[in-house]
Image: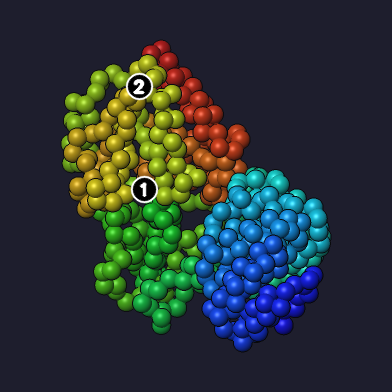
């Protein structure tokens, strides 16, 4: 039971506050709130009643009221550890994580050994993109509780966010030792190993993602066994898509390996990709999600194929190009593009918006490219829904090609591929368009955020996945300007080579 002592408290306050505590014990929380509110009206200068009122309101999900009460408690008792902790926790719950950093810093300074304070501080600092400071907070959390798997796991995330995958792997391994059956820790270990180029161990650990609730796929085939990497000669294997559109484009190359093993292959794709993937080598039957699936002897998620096929960093399947533009659509778009701009300009197709905000490039950053002499930019940005077609600012001189107004929702990237075929260069964020252009073997400048995805590993500017793709990584966090300066310089050099007749 919650107890409190009162310095000269009046009988009415004692009666209301005590009644509130009894209601809490009886789990009559709405009645407890009424009692505490009455007590607070009698003695508004008493911090304990505001503190307990805030806890009860938070338990009821009434977060605005809880914020008022806890703020009042903190004002009256600014250095109380429990109040600081509860106030910060409420701010995090209300998605005001940046505001939680200050009270958590105060709490750690006052009570370094307070349970969970350092851990929550690390989480708050990660949320506001300060992994270096988060690392220090997690270090304290691990010192206070070495057996806490979550603190070791999150410290790994702080290392990874700083571009230190080897250090991240050390922390993730500790988390795995402490909780060997935790899918999250093991998947995270896999990501850090893959980022460092350790495919042999990394792909095995990455398989644990399939045990996470977020990756539980219902493929309507509960009786079909998972393929374990064994012989496939004469068997039908169903491979189903996983995660994003770009993932499908990148890993669809593995279908040719399965076909070479003697399998009859079936691939289930996202509906928008069906027309684009129709000619990919190694696919005997292509179905879109929602269409009837044929019988199969075994199945496997697409992104499990690197593990099942025993891929290493040195044996990533090639076969590029394995995507090709439809010849008729390519001819149509070549004609339209010729009509839309000067024939002698370097045609650069651009895409700036990805599914993840951290990977999206602010459109105004392309001004550096649009101002280059001898360059014409063409938008490859697709609509993300009916009526949501994004047109670039006319001041940037980016061509929005006629006939691509976002109304044809069944285009399925067929026109995107055809336009890519007509471009001299693609400049894209880490997105499906970048993957399509890479899979077509077209020249690509891929602009990567500070924390690049594991698939790009740590190669400075090249990737074994797409031979004609060059990587442009941020040199420091949130520095898209620096990325675009380097891309502009490379394009300028390309134009100079063209003018000099040098390939």
Q: Of helix, strand and loop, which one carries label 1?
A: loop
Give the residue pinned by disc 1: 322
The x and y percentages for residue 92 are 59, 58
Q: Is residue 365 above or below residue 101?
A: above
Q: Nearer the viewer, residue 137 or 275?
A: 137
Left of 198 or right of it: where is 398? left
Task: Specify the quadrant of the image occupied by residue 144.
Answer: bottom right
Task: Please report the residue visible at 72 percent of the width from the left and 74 percent of the height from the top.
Answer: 10
Q: Residue at x 40, y 38 (%)?
A: 352
Most extreme residue toward the top is 500
Residue 197 in the figure: left or right of residue 392? right
| Residue 274 in the figure: left or right of residue 487 | left
**Residue at x 38% of width, y 54% of height:** 245
Give the x, y percent position of residue 44.
Answer: 65, 64
The residue at the far bottom in this view is 26
Q: Which of the 4 quarters of the picture holds residue 301?
A: bottom left
**Front-most of 77 and 100?**
77
| Of the pair 136 and 65, the residue shown nearer to us | 65
Q: Which residue is mark 2?
A: 375
């Amino acid at each position: 039971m919650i107890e409190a002592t009162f310095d000269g408290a009046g009988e009415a306050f004692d009666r209301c506050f005590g009644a509130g505590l009894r209601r809490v014990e009886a789990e009559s929380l709405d009645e407890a709130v009424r009692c505490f509110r009455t007590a607070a009206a009698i003695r508004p200068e008493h911090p304990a009643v505001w503190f307990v009122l805030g806890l009860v309101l938070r338990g009821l999900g009434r977060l605005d009221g809880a914020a008022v009460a806890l703020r009042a408690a903190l004002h009256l008792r600014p250095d109380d550890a429990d109040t600081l902790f509860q106030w910060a926790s409420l701010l995090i719950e209300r998605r005001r994580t940046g505001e939680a950093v200050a009270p958590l810093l105060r709490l750690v300074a006052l009570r370094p050994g307070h349970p969970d304070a350092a851990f929550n501080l690390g989480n708050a600092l990660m949320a506001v993109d300060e992994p270096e400071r988060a690392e220090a907070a997690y270090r304290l959390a691990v010192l206070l509780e070495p057996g806490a798997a979550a603190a070791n796991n999150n410290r790994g995330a702080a290392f990874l966010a700083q571009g230190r995958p080897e250090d991240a792997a050390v922390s993730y391994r500790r988390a795995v030792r402490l909780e060997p059956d935790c899918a999250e820790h093991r998947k995270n270990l896999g990501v850090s190993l893959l980022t460092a180029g350790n495919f042999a161990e990394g792909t095995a650990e990455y398989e644990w993602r399939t045990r996470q609730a977020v990756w539980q796929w219902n493929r309507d085939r509960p009786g079909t066994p998972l393929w374990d990497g064994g012989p496939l000669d004469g068997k039908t294997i169903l491979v189903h898509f996983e995660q994003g559109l770009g993932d499908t484009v990148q890993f669809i190359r593995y279908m040719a390996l399965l076909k070479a093993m003697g399998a009859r292959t079936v691939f289930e794709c996202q509906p928008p990709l069906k027309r684009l993937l129709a000619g990919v080598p190694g696919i005997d039957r292509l179905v879109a999600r929602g269409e009837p699936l044929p019988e199969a002897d075994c199945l496997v998620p697409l992104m499990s194929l690197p593990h099942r096929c025993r891929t290493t960093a040195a044996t990533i399947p090639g076969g590029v190009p394995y995507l090709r533009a439809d010849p008729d659509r390519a001819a149509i778009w070549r004609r339209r593009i010729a009509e839309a701009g000067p024939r002698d300009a370097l045609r650069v197709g651009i895409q700036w918006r990805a599914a993840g905000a951290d990977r999206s490039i602010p459109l105004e950053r392309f001004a550096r490219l649009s101002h280059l002499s001898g360059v014409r930019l063409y938008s490859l940005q697709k609509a993300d829904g009916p009526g949501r077609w994004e047109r670039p600012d006319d001041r940037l001189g980016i061509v929005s090609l006629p006939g691509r107004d976002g109304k044809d929702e069944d285009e399925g990237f067929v026109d995107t591929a055809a336009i890519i075929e007509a471009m001299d260069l693609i400049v894209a964020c880490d997105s499906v368009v970048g993957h399509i252009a890479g899979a077509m073997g077209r020249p690509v400048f891929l602009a990567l955020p500070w924390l690049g995805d594991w698939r790009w590993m740590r190669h400075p500017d090249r990737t074994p996945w797409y031979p004609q793709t060059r990587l442009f990584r941020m040199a420091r966090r949130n520095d898209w300007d620096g990325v675009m300066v380097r891309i502009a310089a490379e394009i300028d050099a390309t134009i100079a080579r063209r003018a000099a007749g040098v390939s």
